[in-house]
Amino acid sequence: MAVSYVKKCPECEGINLVLDKERGEVHCRDCGLVIEEKMVDFGQEWREFDHEQATSRRRTGGPMTYTKFDRGLGTDVGKKSDIYQLGGKERNRFFRLRKWQYRISTAIERNLKLALAELKRVSSYLKLPKAVEEESARIYTLAVQRGLVRGRSMESVVAGALYAACRRHEVPRTLDELSEASGIDKKEIGRTYRFVTRELGIRILPSNPVDYLARFASALKLNAETQSRAVEILEKAQNSELTSGRGPTGIAAASLYVAALMNNEKRTQREVADVAGVTEVTIRNRYKELLKKLKLDEKVKKKIGRG
C-alpha cells in the first residue's frame, strides 16, 4: 500500500515522495532514490472485530486522570471470577492481596478518595462537561498537596475548585447553583474559591454576562431573536461601561428582560429573577439603568403599547 509522504528528496529536491508501508520505505517517485528504509510500524499488530476483543487484546490501560486518587494508574489483583477458581490457600492469599491493595496508606490519598467521589457527584448534578471535572480535580489535588484543605471542610474546597474550573472553561454556573448542589453556603464557597485561586496562583478573568444568556433564555423559553437582541443590548452596555462593578448574572437577566419586552415576549421580573438566581430588586435596578443609559425607553414603551 503506497501513501503520499510530505518531505523533500535530497537528490532531485522533488516532493513527489511515497511511503510504502509494506516495505517500510520512503522513496522518490521522480528519481527512485530510497530516502528511508526499515521503518518501524507503530500501528497495532492485531485485529479486533468487537468491543470484547478490543478490550482483551490491548496491552495498555486507560489514560491518566486526576478524577481518581491514584490518577488511574492502579491495577486490580485478579477478578473475583478468577479468584474463586483457585484452591483454598491460593484463594485466601489473593483475598489478602486485594485487601492490602484497597487499603490506602497516606492521609492525602484517603482525603482524595473521599473528596473526588463528592466532586463527581456535584459535577454530575450540575451536568458539567468532562474537561471541567478533570480541571477541578486537578485544582483540588494541588490544594491538598499544599495543605490548603486543613482547617476547611472538604465539601467547601470541592465546591470552590469546581467553581474555579467552571470560570476557567467559561461554563456558566452561579454560586447559588453550586450551593444547592453541594449543600454549602454560597458565601463559604466564594471565600474558599478566592483563597484557593490566590494560593495556587490561578488567574481567572471576570465572568462575561453573555455566557449566561443562552441558559437563561432556554429556561425562560425565549426565542432566538430575543436572545440575539439581548446580546446586542449587552454589547452596548459593555461599550458604555455599564457592566463594570455589577454582577454578570443580574445584568444578563436584565438585558433578557428588556429584549423580551421589545420582542413582545413578556416575562415577569419574578420569573427572570428566579431563573437567574437574583432578586427582583436587582432586575429592576439593572433594567432602569439599561433603559436610561442606552436610551431604550421609547422603544420599550412603543412595544408595550402595541402589545
Image: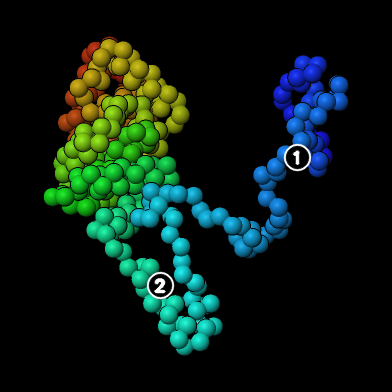
Compared to 46, does 138 lie above or below?
Answer: above
Which residue is at a point 27% across and 12% down the rendered structure image? 240
The residue that mark 1 highlights is 38
Q: Secondary structure at mark 1?
A: loop
Residue 160 - label: none
Above or below, 75 relative to 212:
below
Q: Which residue type does callout 2 highlight?
A: Arg
Rendering coords of residue 122 (x, y %): 32, 51
Left-right relation of 301 to 91: left
Element marked by disc 2: helix
Q: Amino acid at mark 1?
A: Lys
* Foreground residue among 33 and 150: 33
Q: Is residue 275 visible?
A: no
Going from N to C along the chain, the mark reached first, 1 or 2, is: 1
The residue located at (23%, 52%) in the rendering is: 155
- Callout 2 crowding tier (Cα within 10 Å): few <14, some 14–19, many ≥20: some
Residue 210 versus residue 47: which sits nearer the camera? 47
Task: Name the mark nearer the viewer: 1 or 2.
Answer: 1
Q: Quadrant of residue 286?
A: top left
Point 41% across, 27% down: residue? 227
